[in-house]
Structure formats: C-alpha cells, structure tokens
Amino acid sequence: GSDTDHEEEEADEAEETATDIAIQQDVKERLENIKVTLFKIDQGKFGFCEKCAAEIGQNVLDVDPESRWCQACKLAN
C-alpha cells in the first residue's frame, strides 16, 4: 500500500476510537441517570424536578423515563 492508504487507515481507526469513546460516555451517563432514578423511586421522590421540585409531566417521562427535570426547567437550560 501507499502512504495515502496508511494515513486513511489511521484516520479511520482514530474516528472509530472517537466514536467508541463517545458511546461509552453516553452509556455511563445513562447508567448514572438510571441509578439516580432508582434511588428516587426508593425514596418516593420519583417524578419530581430536581431544580424546582415541580412534578415532571407524564409527557416528559414517556420520552425520557429517567428525566431529572420538568419540561420548563429543561427549556430554561
């Protein structure tokens, strides 16, 4: 192969590594949110916003069951 082929292969590997790292970070964040949600369920605090303490609407929980914020607080961010 030529040097160009080698450089393209390295670029492909670097892109794959970056993608893998991003996926791993997403999974870690989701797992942490699930752990928090399970703790909130145990404490009887599931479904309430961590910022304003308002009830998180069912429409938000249907889309994101481990949501930590109500729709208004999500939009304010």
Image (tube, helix red, strand yellow):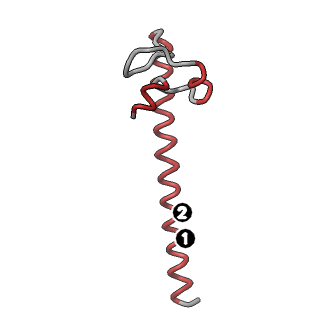
Q: How many marks?
A: 2
Element assignment for label 2: helix
Residue picked out by circle 2: 16
Element assignment for label 1: helix
Q: Residues within 10 Å of mark 2 (few under 14, many from 20)?
A: few
Q: Determine whether 55 is above or below 22 in the image.
A: above
Residue type indicated by callout 2: Glu
Q: Are marks 2 and 1 in contact (CB under 8 Å)?
A: yes
Please tell me which residue lies in front, 76 or 32.
Answer: 76
Quadrant in which the N terminus is drawn? bottom right
Q: Residue at x 57, y 23 (%)?
A: 61
Q: Determine whether 12 is above or below 52 in the image.
A: below
Please tell me which residue lies in front, 44 or 35.
Answer: 44
Residue type indicated by callout 1: Asp
Residue lying furthest right in this view? Answer: 62
Q: Residue at x 52, y 49 (%)?
A: 23
Quadrant in which the C terminus is drawn? top left
Which percent across, then down, holds residue 51?
37, 22
Q: Residue at x 50, y 27 (%)?
A: 67
Q: Determine whether 52 is above or below 77 in the image.
A: above
Q: Residue at x 43, y 19 (%)?
A: 49
Label ID, residue 12: 1
Which percent across, then down, holds residue 11?
50, 73
Please tell me which residue lies in front, 41 or 53.
Answer: 53
Which percent across, then down, holds residue 68?
46, 25
